[in-house]
Amino acid sequence: MDSVVIIKVISALLYPLGLASLCVFLAVLLLLRGRRLAARYCSTFAVVILLLASNPMLASKLVYSLERQHPQRAVDSFAKHDAIIVLGGGLRIPTAPAKYAQLAHGSDRYWYAARLYRAAKADKIIISGGNVYQQPGLKSEAYYASELLQQWGVPQDAIELEVGSRTTAENQRNTVDLISKNRIQSALLVTSAIHMPRAYSLFFKLPIEITPASADVLIRQQNWPAIFNFIPSASALRLTTVALHEYYGIWFAALRSGLLR
């Protein structure tokens, strides 16, 4: 089992649903051993985890704590850069029975990159993103994203692909050669607003000027009855999980950096 798979398995167990499942499993083991009080504590903890993680207000605050760090800007507010770097994500490659790549959560980054290009904010787009798991007979996510951008008016010769990365850290490492090859001195970094803090913390280390250009804003001002802020929902659980995914990534990168010093 390779390191990326191991990290993803560990992360899945640390997400709310994974933690709650572990607590329930432990509660069953304790109950079988006759330790009813400890089993009760574990099962109660599982319920508390799920109730907190599925609370819309808490989920919104977690996501907003990340998105507010690099708010989305109007396209016209950016100065011209040498390139636009778009990080992979939000695109479903055409695995069977699908015949075409499909837009998913996070895919607005590609549309935002196309808008930046068409507004003459850069002459080159670098798309960085391979497939996390091997998909026999299919090309990388970056390839299908390139097809999408071309359909939106970006010429093929303006697009460079990095197709080997499986993580954000690999996105950063694997774009170095393309940056050098194209003599890029400045770039707009395009990814989801919630992902931008982690991505920018890696890309700002490159020896070029990096400007965050956030897309896919999840938390927006909406007028709805306040009571819905307190009713648990599956969508809130998903938001909490996405936010924790980013925080875990940030903490892991900080831990790894400290260990390598």
Image (tube, rainbow, N blue to C red):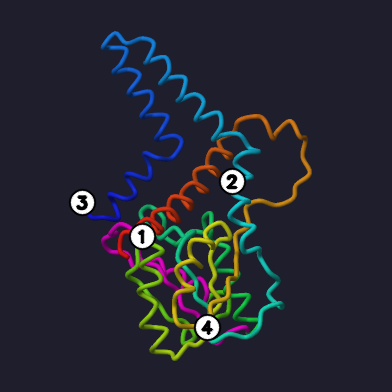
Residue at disc 4, secondary structure: strand
Point out which mark residue 191 bears: none
Residue that badge 2 annotates = 62
Instruction: Say which label, 4 or 3, has the lower sequence index.
Output: 3
Q: Based on the displayed image, in which of its 4 quarters is residue 151 positioned?
A: bottom right
Distance between mark 1 and mark 4 Cα atoms: 31 Å
Looking at the image, is mark 3 or mark 1 nearer the viewer? 1
**Residue at screen point 53% across, 81% down:** 209
Of the residues shown, which amino acid type is indicated by label 4?
Ala
**Residue at screen point 23% across, 55% down:** 2
Instruction: Say which label, 3 or 2, has the lower sequence index.
Output: 3
Instruction: Say which label, 2 or 4, has the lower sequence index.
Output: 2
The range drawn in magenta is 121-149
Q: Residue furthest bottom?
A: 183
Residue that badge 4 annotates = 83
Of the residues shown, which amino acid type is indicated by label 1?
Gly
- Near-viewer residue (253 or 124): 253
Distance between mark 2 and mark 4 Cα atoms: 31 Å
